[in-house]
Amino acid sequence: MNDVQLQHIKIEKLGPVDYCEMDVYPMMVLTGAQGTGKSTIAKAIYFFKMFKSIALQQIQKERFSRAFTEEKNTLQYRIMKELRSVFLQEFGSTWGMSRELSLSYEFGKEYWISVGLIHDKDNPNYIWIEFSKMLTELMKKWEKEFVDTEALVDAEEMRLTIASDLNDKFEIVYIPAGRSMMTLLSNHINYIYSTMDDVQKRMIDYCTKNYLEMTMKLKPAFAKSRKEMIDDVFQTTTEKMNGSVLNYARRLMENILKGEYLYSDGEERLLIDTHKKNYVKINFASSGQQESVWILNILFYYLLYGKNTCVIIEEPESHLFPDAQKLISEFIVLFYNQGNQVLLTTHSPYVLGSLNNMLYADKMNKKGVAGVEKVIDSKVWLDAERTEAYFVADGGAESCKDIEMCAIKNEVIDGVSGVINDEFDKLLELYYAGKDAEC
């Protein structure tokens, strides 16, 4: 772990989370019952990780304002204002929030952001955002380099500078739960979204809005088969690409979807035979296919183009049969192993069990055990030192990784099985007691 600078988050009195403090690992899993705060924690991490994108966006807006209008604001003011807006779009009105609300996030020891509420008669429940001294100095540096200049500055250069200054090269992507409904409306979503004004769009949950915009933007990229997409990239790029990884990803996608996604003639289709002639429109596909298709597409796209990405995925197992849950877990780890970051929320013992097998495969290989590759492909071995799992319950979150076994604790994976088995044993006792009474 010496090559990784762990970021750190602390949350107090936000939704169902009473108090939570954790390191943000390259590979993270949040599990626990519904309504305990898994999504709240995931969205809080996303909120803070959006800082880089928001900073870049506001740099570009301030450059425009100073060049073409009389309006001038400090970059820090613009970023703070936008963060406040994003917070409200992610978590809703502050009127229902605790007055003790507090969030903080460390990109590094010297670089942190905190969020809280202030309460006075002029500004009741006002979101107060504070930056560390060093982060404030960074924003002044960016303003001097990129805003207080008439020279043309490439957006990619600005992005790389911000990422380097914060030692965080990863683009952040959030894939929310409830994907099947958005896929179900596939043929209409572009029209519905295009008719909304800015106020209506801001009323959509921020994570969902970004997800919708991303899928609409990426659809045309899937006008060709995955094999054709891979071939095109190999022909047009000078960068070294791992063909075996991409083809492994392609095969996993086909096995999970039982077909191949294609965007053709303005509609989303799932090709369902080996000759790629017969298809169903995606809004007529199964709910499992609808739920998983854009997880697979998004991860494949970023994998294909070698973009360093941190992806937050809510409930990747939704509506999938257990064997597909295993495969999508492998697909996610394959993506992670190519230098990306992943945060999962899940209720599924199949997902957690699959992750455990991949953790154990890596442990056995490091111990020199032969033949591991024949059981689990090395492309999806999972390094326990870079992986953490948290059990979210009772307003908090605790690590549920067994350090000695380098695995997620079994009682967390399927604790309810013991309850079900106990109930069945009691029913059997009643049955045999009744049989004895008849005798």
Image (tube, helix red, strand yellow):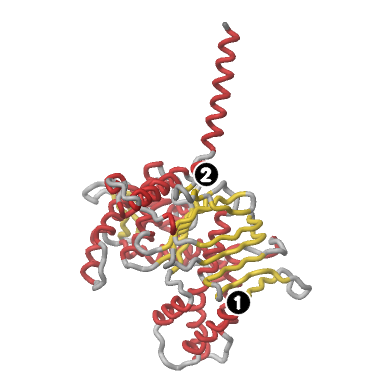
SS under mark 1: strand
Q: Which quadrant would residue 71 be assigned to in this image?
A: bottom right
Question: Foreground: 352 or 324?
Answer: 352
Q: Is residue 87 left or right of residue 234?
A: right
Question: Foreground: 378 or 15?
Answer: 378
Question: Looking at the picture, which amino acid does disc 2 mark?
Answer: Val
Q: Is residue 122 above or below residue 394?
A: below
Q: How far separated are the C-alphas under marks 1 and 2?
A: 37 Å
**1 or 2: mark nearer the eye:** 2
Instruction: Residue under label 2, please give it.
Output: 412
Question: Residue at (57%, 48%) from the top-left corner?
Answer: 34
Q: Which quadrant would residue 20 be assigned to in this image?
A: bottom right
Q: Position of residue 5 (x, y in %)?
A: 47, 68
Question: Residue at (30%, 44%) from the top-left corner?
Answer: 375
Q: Position of residue 410 (x, y in %)?
A: 49, 42
Question: Residue at (71%, 68%) from the top-left corner?
Answer: 125
Of the 4 image quadrants, the one containing the N terminus is bottom left
Crowding at mark 2 (Cα within 10 Å: few <14, some 14-19, many 20+)? some
Question: Foreground: 119 or 90?
Answer: 119
Res 238 visible: yes
SS under mark 2: helix
Of the 4 image quadrants, the one containing the C terminus is top right
Q: Position of residue 157 (x, y in %)?
A: 40, 82
Res 328 visible: no
Per the rendering, the mark at residue 131 is: 1
Asked if disc 1 and disc 2 are in contact, CB closer than 8 Å, the reply is no
Q: Position of residue 297 (x, y in %)?
A: 36, 58
